[in-house]
Image (spheres, grey):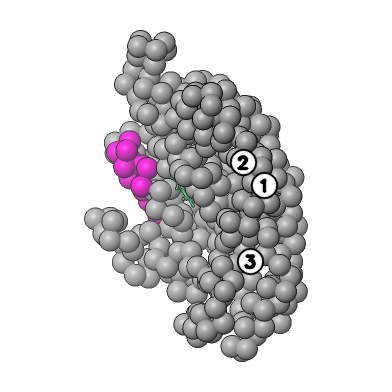
Amino acid sequence: MIPFMDLETQYQAIQPEIDAAIFNVIHSYKFINGPEVAKFEGNFAAAQDLKYMLGLASGTAALHLAYEVLGLKPGDEVIVPTMTFIATAEALKQVGAKPVFADIDPVSYNIDCNSLKKLLTKKTKAVVIVHLHGNPCEMEPVVNFCRVNDLKLIEDCAQAHLAEYKGRKVGTFGDVATFSFYPGKNLGAYGDAGALGTNNEALYEKAKLLANHGREEKYIHRTEGYNYRLDTLQAAILDVKLRYLPRWTDQRINIAKKYRSLLNHLPITLPEMNPDKKHVYHIYAVATERRDKLSATLKAHKIAFGIHYPLSLHLQPAYSYLKYKPGDLPISERLSNQFLSLPMYAELAEIEIEKICRAISSVY
Ligand SMILES: Cc1ncc(COP(=O)(O)O)c(C=O)c1O
């Protein structure tokens, strides 16, 4: 069996450091806001070239706080790509704002920048972009659109730790960046965790206050907030893993190169390769019209795979109240029927990549 990801092998390689980090937190008994939290926040801020980083309970909590500190309110409209995990749009519910779904670009799979103008109304207040699969979104058109129309820009970097656009880290282009450390992410915790990053001190301070019950001192609360704190244990684990992230990212990039060299001749679409972008391959999705046949073949060869995502958000039951119809956002709808994500993790061996590619080749 070749798994889709292999957290066990990853753990075995760094077990002494992880175990020591966990042991130290347990024996410090500082499970909430222990010193490991600030240490990880500082190290991750530096890794992402952001001035301020706030560790949080999840990527979804980070999105909610981003929307709140940017002042989004009931009745506001926010443009969101329809091809993403639901959290990107779902967190808007917490501030009462309405998602307006945008189609995606057929090559990068990120928000279709050409569609932004026609989605703009008097109620539009912000644009959220998602660096989908770890592939950076083309930033100039989005940044310009937001500047000209006085809109806030949020970068959902849940899948794109250390990714770069034109040599600049993702998350540094918008007002606020959000990250997820869901266990399977390129930088994954041993449970739920996330972060909010920004270069804007005022936004950071607001988010920090809200994430910890609006408290200024232990029992003095300036405002009502939330319990969105990053767990000390998760911070300690993440700080160990962060040291390995550049190497693991290079390994993912090398695996992607190997996939490309073995699959390039087949009639399937491979992820975008763009010299302006450092794609970090959280997901290695191929697109094929013969997905049923390909998935049956992979199953027969005991090769695990994923589908990210099988139904675009605008057609999800959760958004039926917005009254979108099939055909409204056709590129995303087509790709949701064609995407198939191959195994991708730093420890994936060359011989396994070859086996996967032989199985895929046998379909064509
Ligand atoms: C694009 C995207 N946004 C947001 C999230 C939500 O993050 P979390 O699961 O940490 O809440 C995820 C992943 O889970 C994601 O892939």
The residue positioned 61% from the left and 79% from the top of the image is 268
The residue positioned 74% from the left and 70% from the top of the image is 350
Q: Is residue 91 magenta?
A: yes
- Closer to viewer: mark 1 or mark 3: 1
Task: Give me the C-alpha separation between circle 1 and circle 3.
Answer: 30 Å
**Mark carried by residue 271:** 3
Q: In this rendering, would 83 be left or right of 135?
A: left
Camera-side residue: 352 or 344?
352
Question: How many other residues sit within 10 Å of disc 1, few (<14), some (14-19) or many (≥20)?
Answer: few
> Which residue was labeled with disc 2?
18
Q: Is residue 277 above or below residue 125?
A: below
Residue type at the position of mark 3: Pro
The residue positioned 37% from the left and 42% from the top of the image is 91
Task: Give me the C-alpha separation between circle 2 and circle 1.
Answer: 6 Å
Can you give x and y, in whole percent of width and height, for residue 185 in the image?
A: 55, 51
* Label 2: element kind: helix
The first of marks 1 and 3 along the sequence is 1
Residue type at the position of mark 2: Ile
The first of marks 2 and 3 along the sequence is 2
Task: Give me the C-alpha separation between circle 2 and circle 3.
Answer: 33 Å
Q: Which residues are magenta?
A: 90-101
Q: In this rendering, would 44 be left or right of 194?
A: right
**Mark carried by residue 86:** none
Quadrant of the frame with the N terminus: bottom right
Q: Is residue 269 magenta?
A: no
Residue 207 in sight in this render: no
> Which residue was labeled with disc 1?
14
Can you give x and y, in whole percent of width and height, for residue 104 in the image?
A: 50, 61
Can you give x and y, in whole percent of width and height, for residue 223 in the image?
A: 34, 17
The residue positioned 45% from the left and 64% from the top of the image is 309
